[in-house]
Amino acid sequence: MRFALQLGYWGAGPIPNAPELVAAAEDSGFDAVFTAESWGSDAYTPLSWWGAATQRVRLGTAVAQLSARPPTSLAMAALTLDHLSGGRHIIGLGVSGPQVVEGWYGQPFGKPLARTREYVQVVRDVLARSERVTNDGEHYPLPYPAELPGSTGLGKPLKSITHPLRADIPIWLGAEGPRNVAQTAEIADGWLAVFFSLGLAEQYNTWLDEGFARPGARRSRADFEVAANAQVVITDDVGAAIDRYRPSTALYVGGMGAKEKNFHADLYRRMGYGDAVDEIGRLFQAGRKAEALAAVPDEMVRETMIAGTLDEVKDQVAQWEAAGVTMLMVTARDVGTIRQLGALASAAENRT
């Protein structure tokens, strides 16, 4: 099991101790550092800024939103950062949800699987730099068709001026539903599991195996990475840790999607929390956020968390590894936890 630091996206301002966290992750043997974006801070600027002080850790986006950039623009950012970091970049992509895509980016959300497949292919074509990039797909046509409104008809196929350092920069996809996870196993190099649950591990692996079995699948289980977000808390007071992360669970289930479509809520329903999800959503949508938080059961927060004493955390990490997780993306915000986890990983490596 490898560890990565998930810095995520910012709230009202930057993460105040991010440079110290990144330095601790590098010094403690973490494999990677990730940033994210929602509708505030972007993913690439903090990753480049804080990553400039590193020498070894991989630098990833988890996730960069498809609708934030055309695929050629994403490929430009990726090849640039990969050069500057000496080949340490991981491209992490996700479709986000309809509220963000249509409300923030002003783009249609429809056909997310087809859009993802097409987007990834264009990015790979740019990085391959084998020929001028063209795409006759529905979502990201290149060049822009002359018959479409607003076109001058003057667009021409282009090839990146800059030669990518690596043509095969790894692409990991954030996915939650069965078809999306299966497609991820088919076309990507890794899966970014936003909310991983041991109770659903068998189901996840079935979805992944479906993708690996498809004709032309890019990878197999042996060389595919499963990176799971996790709140890892080393503590004697698990109850306090649950209370700390209860607002996050309530937000994602009740406030990070529309009443009619919330992928996070659907995932927690698969975990068996359908009644709680409905109640949290009802209260959140009514503006009764304090009551929504109170409606989140302890076990629902605990489902996606690793918490306890160091020995208990060690046992839980082993369970996640046995379930197929190859990397834990931890949301630690203190140097002490990062150093303890680094020592844990080092001890495990020495035993093997």
Image (cartoon, grey):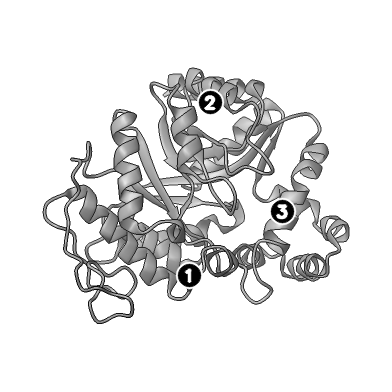
Cα gap from disc 1 to disc 2, whole angstroms: 34 Å
Residue 51 placement, left or right of 141: right
From the image, tell me which residue sits under label 2.
22
Image quadrant in which you'd find residue 112: bottom left
**Which numbered disc, 3 or 1, marks the residue that appears first in the sequence?**
1
Q: Residue 130: where, in percent of width, then height?
A: 11, 51
| Amino acid beneath label 2 | Val
Would residue 319 be visible to someone looking at this image? Answer: yes
Front of the two marks 3 and 1 = 1
Q: Nearer the viewer, residue 266 or 163?
A: 163
Residue 155: % across, % down: 20, 66
Task: Name the amino acid type tagged 3.
Answer: Thr
- Front one among 300 and 203: 300
Residue 57 vs 44, above or below: the answer is above
Front residue of 301/221: it is 301
Q: Is 210 situated left or right of 44 in this image?
A: left
Query: Tag 1, which secondary structure?
Result: loop
Q: In this figure, which residue is indicated by the disc labeled 1?
A: 107
For marks 2 and 3, give the CA distance: 25 Å
Badge 3: residue crowd in 10 Å (few <14, some 14–19, many ≥20): many
